[in-house]
Amino acid sequence: MIDGRGGGELVQSCGKCGQLCAQTDGCRSYECSPTELKCNLNTQLKPAAGSTTSKDYAFCSMAVVPETGLYERDWGQWERGPGDNWQNMQWVGWRMQVPTGKIAKMACYIKFVGAIPDRTDNFGMKFQGQLHNEWVDKTRLRPDHWHHVTATSTTTLGGDGNHFLLIFDSVPGPAQIQIGGLRLEIFDSLPAATGYVCHPGPGVTPPPPAPPLIPPSPPEGEGEEDEGEGGGGEAGGEDGDEGVGGAEEPPAPPGPPMDGTTRSGLNMYCGKWRDGENELKKTQLKNMVKCMQQDCVQSMEEIRCDYLTPTSGGTDKATLCYTNPGQLFCKQNPTSVDCKNVATWVPVVNVPFRGSFKDQKQKSKKVTNEMDFSCVCAKKCSYWSTQNSLRCADGWEMVGNPLDSPFQRENLKQSKGDRGVTHDSGKAEECACVCGSVFDNKWTFA
């Protein structure tokens, strides 16, 4: 966990976990489970010594340029009393000659006891005389809480006696600041934080290789040219070529089935819907609409959603996205009975409610298969419930049939944006979904 984020935090997809790491100061790796959709953020590039990633959690580290120097200091505390008396240290850091043009990055954990000091001219992280204290942000930092802070600067040889410091000279007393894990990294060029290298956890079972496509031998007597009249196939050509048999090429044999763990790998809310046979109707809808939202987001990510479950929850109307292990298995075994290939992902249609449910008016009511629901999603959009409108990035699209649903364009608030759709570039990696029935006009949004 870093700064209160990424300690088993629930995410829509593991891609979102990677985005959270990229947006969090000091995050250099993350761990994520495609089935549990829990996200852990780390400050180290490699797993801790002696530890192993559990279940199907992948460990993904930032793809950075090699370090040319790494320097670390232990814990410490700085204090200044009301009478401006110095206690312990007024700065902590290093003095070293680093050539001009390198990239220096300083990071540490820090806790301000009682109050956050104001930004002043000699308080912050100082690189050969260049002060960086943008991280002293009272809107983000909280007193008496540990925070992870970073700053980056280009080196200038000789500045400020070649000191690299975390300095508190201009902080007025009384003040108490605790620090830990102070580290300085020197790079030849700016680290590239745009990509991660991932290593799957031990709980991910590698899919078996696809079987060789060896056509079966024909039964005795078939496919051979008979003597005399009516030889197999067509007559020879003008140049005396032999005849060509007319038998069709045999179909490829089915691939191997998935193992149980891979087959059960669905996005979190899809698994909740699958396992919630006797839930209330509204709960079944709630789980499915969030399932569709997660599948929709996955369909736009690198993992995609090219393969679906043939059935789920006892119905072939609910074909849901496999998570990463299932997608990988199906790519290597596309003829497996457990793999349904789709050219384009679309939400589910005419899914029956299942089991029995209880409500306030009726103790128990059997749900029949005539009662069903469908879903519609808007890619690159979010739903603005208070305004009954969509907020969408460029290139947004509706997937599924919106006719008579709340997402039908005429049913949105026409005065908002362009007939109910407002432009918002921040929604490029989101999905808005709605599930319900036109018969009772009850809908659930995500």
Image (tube, rainbow, N blue to C red):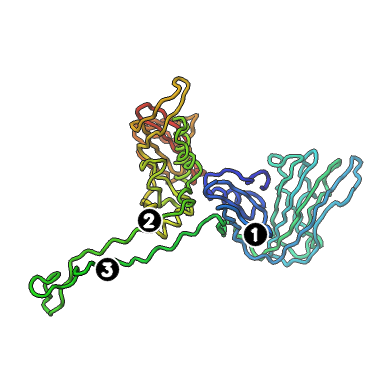
Which residue position holds label 1? Answer: 46
Q: Is residue 16 shown to the viewer in this render?
A: yes
Kind of residue sitting beneath label 1: Lys
Instruction: Determine contact: label 1, label 3, CB under 8 Å.
Output: no
Few, some or many residues within 10 Å of mark 2 (<14, 14–19, 20+): some
Kind of residue sitting beneath label 2: Ser
Q: Mark 3, mark 2: which one is toward the viewer? A: 3
Q: Residue 217: give its label.
A: 3
Give the SS element for disc 1: loop
Q: Quadrant of residue 58?
A: bottom right
Which residue position holds label 2? Answer: 336
Q: Quadrant of residue 73?
A: bottom right
Q: Is residue 240 above or below residue 425?
A: below
Few, some or many residues within 10 Å of mark 3 (<14, 14–19, 20+): few
Q: Earlier in the sequence, mark 3 or mark 2?
A: 3
Q: Name the side, left or right, on which 425 lies relative to 400.
A: right
